[in-house]
Amino acid sequence: MTLTDTHTHLYYLFGTPELDLQMQRCFTNGVQQLLLPNVDRESIPKVLGTVASFPGHCYAMMGLHPCEVKANYKDELAVIEKTIAENKVYGIGEIGIDLYWDKTTLPLQQEAFRIQTMWAKVLDLPVSIHCRNAFDELFELLDEVQDGRLRGVLHCFTGNSQQAKRTIDLGLNLGIGGVVTYKNAGLDAVVAALDLRHVVLETDAPYLAPMPYRGKKNESSYLLHIAQKIADLHGISLETVAAATTENARQIFRIK
């Protein structure tokens, strides 16, 4: 059985013994492939270092996280763009819109999103999109930039069934993480009605740990619990969920 974590910040642990320990726990739980989304220029060496340490298991993505979009965002983007040109990357991310922490940067976030989705289309790379308190703003942007070439994942999807359908209609897949295991989140009912061909799995580690680890630091090995929850919701085997979602991830990110 092979599980694929399409969105993890496990690279935050690069340079510490804990990284090796967590990777071994991943392998024990069948998590064999991990996509690592960058957040800013400072995290680039950690992403690349983790990929170099675990070839064939860890894959780099590069992007500027919306919470890191400040007045100097063009300088950050220049560094990230250069990194993409000089390294093998499998996606543009983590990009998106976040209006939870700071609404004043929305115009900058929108422009950074336009720039990075253009990279993705020109380079034929998928995107990993962050959306928090901003579905309307994000969908408006996606309507603008989607010309049939944009593909990827709306990561950490926590929306309703209408928002799920809108995402799929826009040509994107849904990244389902630990929130699907939370009793009162309502995401379980949405996921139960989804065709698995639109779904990939993720942890967003070290954030949003699934049950029974909610409230603790998340790690990619916990992807097993997310996969099991989806299997239970669909009334199918864990192995079927693993095979379907890993194949989806391989198709999106073009990994072997």
Image: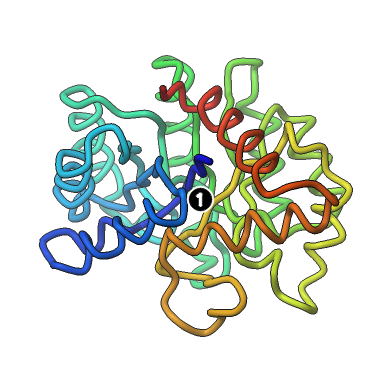
- Which residue is at the far left? 15
Q: Nearer the viewer, residue 241 or 79?
A: 241
Q: Quadrant of the C terminus?
A: top left
* Residue position marked by numbered label 1 in the rendering: 107
Kind of residue at badge 1:
Pro
Q: Is residue 169 above or below residue 49?
A: above
User: Residue at coordinates 83% horizontally, 43% vertically from top-left?
Assistant: 194
Q: In this rendering, would 99 be left or right of 18? A: right
Image spot of residue 139 (x, y percent): 71, 42
Mark 1 Cα shell of 10 Å, populated few (<14), some (14-19), many (≥20): few
Query: Could you tell me which secondary element the residue under label 1 belongs to?
Result: helix
Q: Position of residue 191 (x, y in %)?
A: 80, 52
Q: Is residue 54 above or below residue 133?
A: above
Q: Position of residue 101 (x, y in %)?
A: 50, 72
Image location of residue 49, percent across then percent down: 14, 46
Residue found at x 62% / y 38%: 245
Q: Is residue 192 left or right of residue 15?
A: right
- Classify 156 as above or below 78: below
Residue appearing at x 66%, y 67% in the figure: 179
Image mark count: 1
In the image shown, does 24 or 198 lie closer to the viewer? 24
Q: Residue at x 65, y 64 (%)?
A: 133
